[in-house]
Amino acid sequence: MAYANLDDVKTYLLDLQERLCAALADEDGSHFREDAWTREEGGGGRSRVIEHGGVFEKGGVNFSHVFGERLPPSATAARPELAGRSFHAVGVSWVLHPENPHVPTSHGNVRFLIAEKPGETPVWWFGGGYDLTPYYPVHGDVLHWHRVAREACAPFGEEVYPRYKAWCDDYFFLKHRDETRGVGGLFFDDLNDWGFECSFAFQRAVADSFLAAYLPIVRRRRDTPWGQRERDFQLYRRGRYVEFNLVWDRGTLFGLQSGGRTESILMSMPPLARWQYDWTPEPDSPEAVLTRDYLHPRDWLGEQARENPA
């Protein structure tokens, strides 16, 4: 594979970081600070973080391009054919933790990896997606989120949204809690069977749809009144977010094992979180509704979901 393709992906991802930061900073009324970093084994990146703004208590939009002579164990354990190959991994990831508990947390990333070995065909794939983690969910917001995701997938086939929606539900699942992290979205990985150009186009379609999916929700909920009860519940649920990232997330493991910048990798963590022993919400309370109606896989855009909103 020609490295012109890697360069094309990298150019797009750097521009994506710029566009995400500009739109999010404008919504927040603040600005991102940037840290550029280098990796001793090869590569580096630029991390952009926003804190204590008008909307976001903490957020980050990170670009990285790392390369080396061998992939970390998290990449080769399930794909032994990658052992002994040099690699380039390039991506943008973003996580947004609003202060208002009525505004959902959101995460997304898009990435590209190519692994090469002399005399053998390069192995490459795209991956990425985005997901939504509300604390006090609004059914209409969840429908909007999934409609935008479905529209982004539509040009690539009717089966694409259901496939990657289901993958997201399965991936962002806390097995030790028997619950999803939030209301899902899209997740795809190892995408190369469409060919480079179509796979790259799909990655762009997903990433370019994020702001249309997320910002309308932010604008509808950012001024909703809240108090200590809502704040305590938000911090409690943020604990679940931490648990997923440290126990189950493959991206976190890959970043740490590949020698990425720890501060940038753990940027995804919320600024504050709490754990309370064996806490359960009051029956039929707004907090109970989250667990009962939202933290399990659901066909949000199906007929039943539209007829019987939570």
Image (tube, helix red, strand yellow):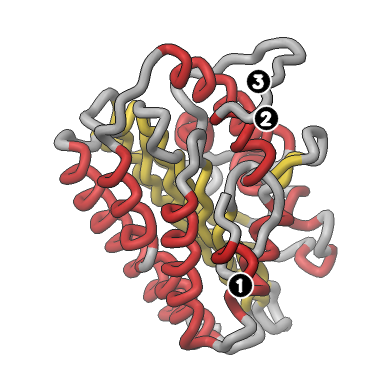
**Relative side of 219 to 282, left or right:** left
Residue 24 in the image, given as x and y percentages of width and height: 25, 46
Q: Which mark is residue 279?
A: none
Q: Quadrant of residue 97?
A: top left
Residue 172 in the image, given as x and y percentages of width and height: 67, 48
The CA span between labels 1 and 2 is 33 Å
Residue 21 in the image, given as x and y percentages of width and height: 26, 48
- Residue at the image point whose x is 64% and y is 74% from the top: 162
- The amino acid type, in three-letter code, at marker 2 is Glu
**Relative side of 83 to 42, left or right:** right
Residue 63 in the image, given as x and y percentages of width and height: 40, 51
The secondary element bearing badge 1 is classed as helix
The secondary element bearing badge 2 is classed as helix
> Are the residues flagged by discs 3 and 1 in contact, CB closer than 8 Å?
no
Mark 1 vs 2, N-terminal side:
2
Query: Nearer the observer, disc 1 or disc 2?
Result: 1
Mark 3 vs 2, N-terminal side:
2
Query: Nearer the observer, disc 3 or disc 2?
Result: 3
Residue holding disc 1: 303
The CA span between labels 3 and 2 is 23 Å
Of residues 158 and 62, the one nearer the viewer is: 158
Residue holding disc 2: 243
Quadrant showing the N terminus: bottom right
Residue 206, compared with residue 1, is above or below; it is above
- Residue at the image point whose x is 47% and y is 15% from the top: 229
Residue holding disc 3: 282
- The amino acid type, in three-letter code, at marker 1 is Glu
The CA span between labels 3 and 1 is 30 Å
**Relative side of 230 to 260, left or right:** left
Mark 3 vs 1, N-terminal side:
3
